[in-house]
Image (spheres, rainbow, N blue to C red):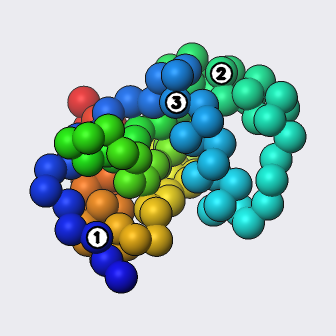
Amino acid sequence: MEEKISEMIIRRVEIKDILTVYEQICELEETTFNINDFQNIFIHNIRDENKIYLLAEDNTGLCLGLISCHIQYLLHHCGKVAEIQELFVKPAYRSSGVGRKLINHMEEMLKK
């Protein structure tokens, strides 16, 4: 059953979001990652200016989904490339526009 979303906020992931991101990535990959390894990579990635992680939340702070994008210079493109690495929307909120809004927000950030 789809949930109705009254208001959505999209913001950058912060260190305090680690467990939220961990749960969503584990669900996305259908596995349980070692939390210590995950934490080390998470902290490294959110501090890297060439990696962008965003969360979509409702007006109560409930996380609806996330998106990540890694930016790198690739020889075979002869330039800078931004690539979505993860996109996850909680099952109850799929087909409600969360994924599209995350992608649109990411695209706007990348244009800047």
Is label 2 in a helix, a strand or a loop? Answer: helix
Residue 68 in sight from this viewpoint: yes
Instruction: Tally the numbered discs.
Output: 3
Residue 63 at x, y percent in the picture? 40, 46
Residue 18 at x, y percent in the picture? 60, 31
Residue 82 vertical position relative to residue 86 in the rendered view, above or below: above
Looking at the image, is mark 2 or mark 1 earlier in the sequence? 1
Camera-near label (2 vs 1) is 1
Q: Which mark is residue 43?
A: 2
C-beta proximity under 8 Å, tags 3 and 1: no
Residue 49 at x, y percent in the picture? 50, 20
Q: Which residue is mark 1?
A: 3
Q: Which residue is mark 3?
A: 17
Residue 30 at x, y percent in the picture? 73, 66
Looking at the image, is mark 3 or mark 2 earlier in the sequence? 3
- Between 60 and 63, the residue placed more toward the observer is 60
Q: Identify the residue at image location x=46%, y=71%.
A: 91
> Would residue 63 appear left or right of 27 to someone viewing this image?
left
Q: Which mark is residue 12?
A: none
Gap between marks 3 and 1 measured at Cα: 22 Å
Residue 57 vertical position relative to residue 17 in the rendered view, above or below: below
Q: Residues within 10 Å of mark 1 (few under 14, many from 20)?
A: few
